[in-house]
Amino acid sequence: MTPERRAALAALQEHELSDEEARQYLDAPMEPAEREALLDLVRWFRSRYPSPADRLAYVRRAYRRWTAGRS
């Protein structure tokens, strides 16, 4: 990866959306293929973690993993 591309990606990562940009994103209609992909993920997650307790346990484990080592 070139330094220029790395800098461009870093700038995108650090960019904070304005209220207008966020609203435009949230108000945009979802494509049928995108909706089906999202529903596939939901179905998978609900089959992997069938009960609310299972889902909460997963989130707690994941949160510990995500925040491990942060100071």
Image (cartoon, rainbow, N blue to C red):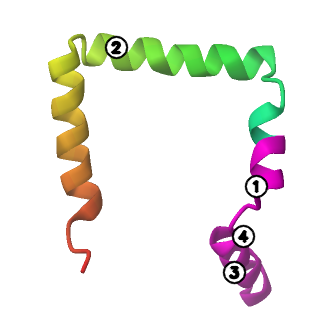
Give the residue pinned by disc 2: 46
The majority secondary structure of the magenta stretch comes to: helix
Give the residue pinned by disc 4: 12
Of the two numbered discs 3 and 1 on the same chain, state the one appearing first in sequence.
Answer: 3
Give the residue drawn at x 37%, y 20%: 45
Task: Characterize the local packing of mark 2: few (<14), some (14-19) or many (20 or more) Cα atoms within 10 angstroms.
Answer: some
Residue depth check, mark 2 versus mark 1: number of the one nearer the observer: 1
Give the residue pinned by disc 1: 19
Residues under labels 4 and 3: Cα distance? 10 Å
Of the two numbered discs 2 and 4 on the same chain, state the one appearing first in sequence.
Answer: 4
Of the two numbered discs 2 and 1 on the same chain, state the one appearing first in sequence.
Answer: 1
Residues under labels 2 and 4: Cα distance? 32 Å
| Magenta highlight range | 1-24
Task: Characterize the local packing of mark 3: few (<14), some (14-19) or many (20 or more) Cα atoms within 10 angstroms.
Answer: few
From this view, report whether residue 24 is shown above or below residue 27.
below
Identify the image quadrant of the C terminus. bottom left
- The answer to whether marks 2 and 3 mark residues whose Cβ atoms lie closer than 8 Å is no
Q: Which of 25 and 48 is in front in this view?
A: 25
